[in-house]
Image (spheres, grey):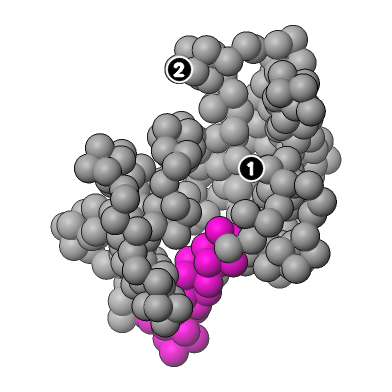
Amino acid sequence: MKTSKKALAPFLSAIVIFGTVGLVRRAIPLSSAAIAAMRGIVGAIVLLTVLFIRQKRFDRSVTGKQTLWLILSGMMIGFNWILLFEAYCYTSVAVATLGYYMAPAIVLAVSPLLFGEKLTGRKIGCLFAALVGMAFVSGVIPGGIPSPSEAKGVLLSLAAAVLYAGDVLINKKLPDVPAMEKTVIQLAAAGLSVLPYAIFTGWGDAASMTTVAWILLAVLCLVHTGLAYLLYFGAIPSLPAQSVALLAYLDPIVAILLSALILKERMNLWEGIGAVLIIGALMVSEISRKTGKTKENGV
């Protein structure tokens, strides 16, 4: 199956949009919980509106059990957004993003236990390289224990990665649920599940919300969630699975480049080595996994 050029452009657009989330969040003085709640609720409304405009009915073939799994997945998404948004406040966008992208490594580590997948020598090597890379990025190697703020940011991003990994594992159980319906339920569950927490903990410094900040919040909800998810899932059916998996790693690369260019958050040599190790190891692991499946299928 050749990569569709028409599908590639919207998919890459979605990846670039996802890569700018950290920059936009930095400019919004609301609490992470408030932003996550609004992002989920507005994103779900946008996708439902698109379904209505296209005169497509919401697929009711989703079973009750699948809906429960999707709600749990959505709750994980909501709280993983909170943790990631908080991580952006304590460490650089690059470091937080790389910590968050340890999720595939977590999935790789637990898949043998949950799905009986074979953990080959190459995969073990990739997992080890990703862990060493994270040690470089966090500053543990070579500088020892990072500052309290930096350490908090790294730990928050890794906690977000654990929830992200949980979401990926749940979605492995739901391969037959239509992408649009799946996303609507997950986004709605994400927004509604964190809304009580946002109300209880406070909305942040709402008094400091300028016109620009309100516009950026709208952009985060409408563009980074509604539009980006629409482009992402709309393009996936026309792209090879391996292309989707590998091109997704442009997200952290975009985040790293923009944090350096716009926020002037330059990575030092060790952080750069760590970034290469993490992204490179996970991409190699993804290639080996897809290649292995191809051989098993006799393709």
Q: Nearer the viewer, residue 226 or 240?
A: 240
Residue highlighted by disc 1 = 98
Is the stretch drawn in magenta largely helix, strand or loop?
A: helix
- In this orientation, does residue 165 appear? yes
Outermost residue to the bottom: 211
Q: Residues within 10 Å of mark 1 (few under 14, many from 20)?
A: many
Image position of 95 (left or right of 217): right
Identify whether 297 is placed above or below 150.
Answer: above
x, y (%) of residue 268?
Answer: 79, 44
Dot placed on the residue nearer the N-terminal end, 2 or 1? 1
Image quadrant assignment for residue 52: bottom left
Question: Which quadrant of the structure image shows residue 51?
Answer: bottom left
| The magenta stretch spans residue 149 | no
- Residue 79 seen by the camera: no
Magenta highlight range: 208-233
Q: Does residue 14 sit above or below 122 in this rendering?
A: below
The residue that appears at 55% across and 35% down in the rendered structure is 103
Rendered residue at 48%/12% (across/down): 113
- Is 215 part of what is drawn in magenta? yes
From this view, report whether residue 169 is shown above or below residue 14: above
Q: Which mark is residue 114?
A: 2
Say which element carries label 1. helix
Please give the name of the residue rendered at 34% of the width and 68% of the height, measured from the top-left corner. 57
Q: Is residue 204 left or right of residue 165?
A: left
Asked whether 44 or 92 is in front, the reply is 44
Crowd tier of the residue under label 2, counting other residues whose Cα lies within 10 Å: few below 14, some 14–19, many 20 or above? few
Residue 240 placed where, x, y %? 72, 46
Residue in front for this viewpoint, 47 or 80: 47
Q: Report, in whole angstroms, how far the alpha carbon at label 2 lies from the one at label 1.
A: 25 Å
